[in-house]
Amino acid sequence: MAGNWKMHLDAASAAALAREVANRVSRAHHCDVAVMPAHPLLPAVARVLDGSSVGYGSQDISAEEEGAFTGEVSARMLLSLGCTYTLVGHSERRENHLETDSLVHLKTARALQAGLIPVVCVGEKLAEREAGQTLHRVETQVTTALKDLGDGISRVVLAYEPVWAIGTGLTATPAQAEEVHEFIRSVVGSLYGAAVADGMRILYGGSVKPDNAATLMAEKDVDGALVGGASLTAESFAGIVNYGD
Ligand code: PGA
């Protein structure tokens, strides 16, 4: 269960939110829990979360190792702050920063090489869904992102986030989510075999809330959630993490 804090909060409010999240999810043993603050907030969040059951990671990573890349953040920097995870290829990066499927692949490979767990985001836009291209688009994204990852594949987490459901209050129905999740698992299976596909964690993202988490998580191939807006208060994020209570 991962909370994507996007470009919200500041050092003090991020530390306070992290503390409250850690308190509220400390008894959640059914899943891993992580938050993804903006890069400059990572040290403040790390100070609070180190030693707790809540992991943390970044919202993006550079595909490059090091060098003259103004504004970029390297895997090594993230590791040195204690990050376990990094989001890769979030639709807001793809849309606003023109990230292509092949750049998403390079970032995924870079994260794995450094020992970070990439949470690789895929998902179709509304026009693609309406044109009947959902599965085709997602297949291309998954196949390109996961190309030639070798043993690292077992550490990859995927997140299916239909772009039309992000921040809109529109959630995919459990059946819509399951259709794509099952398909993604079959694509992973054709690339890396059934054992890898069965073991892959596939998160759903897009307007997940405490009151819709349980029905989404009940689907066979939905293994967790990537939460944006509802991760910005500890009460609603914990309500999602503890959906079975
Ligand atoms: P949302 O965002 O929960 O606010 O729809 C999800 C995401 O962008 O990861």
Image (cartoon, rainbow, N blue to C red):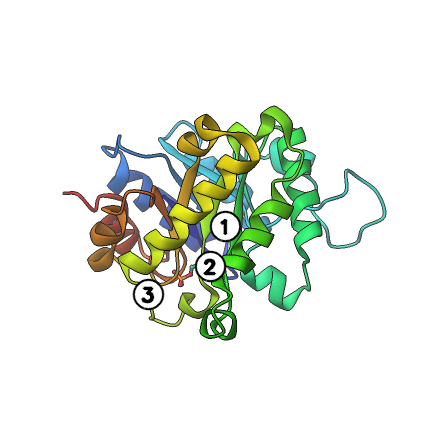
Q: Which residue is mark 1?
A: 37
**Percent x, y of residue 117:** 54, 35
Q: Residue farthest to the left?
A: 245
Q: Disc 2 vs disc 1: Cβ atoms closer than 8 Å? A: yes
Name the disc covering residue 110, or none. Answer: none
Marked residue nearer the N-terminal end (2 or 1)? 2
Q: Which residue is mark 3?
A: 171
**Percent x, y of residue 207:** 35, 63
Residue 232 versus residue 20 in the image, above or below: below
* SS at mark 1 in the image: loop
Residue 52 versus residue 73 in the image, above or below: above
Asked if one can make out residue 222 in the rendered structure from this viewpoint, the answer is: yes
Looking at numbered disc 3 in the image, what kind of residue is underneath it? Answer: Thr
**Percent x, y of residue 206:** 39, 61
Residue 236 versus residue 98 in the image, above or below: above
Quadrant where the N terminus is found in the figure: top left
Quadrant where the C terminus is found in the figure: top left
Marked residue nearer the N-terminal end (2 or 3)? 2
**Percent x, y of residue 31:** 31, 34
Q: Which residue is mark 2?
A: 9
Looking at numbered disc 1 in the image, what kind of residue is underneath it? Answer: Pro
Where residue 48 sits, quadrant-wise, is: top left
* SS at mark 2 in the image: loop
Q: Residue farthest to the right?
A: 68
* SS at mark 3 in the image: loop
Mark 2 residue CB less than 8 A from any atom of ligand 1: no
Mark 1 residue CB less than 8 A from any atom of ligand 1: no
**Residue name at image x 21 percent, y 53 percent:** 215
Instruction: State how far apart marks 2 and 1 are (Cα).
Output: 8 Å
Q: Mark 1 Cα within 10 Å, few/some/many (few <14, many 20+)?
A: many
Asked if one can make out residue 38 in the rendered structure from this viewpoint, the answer is: no
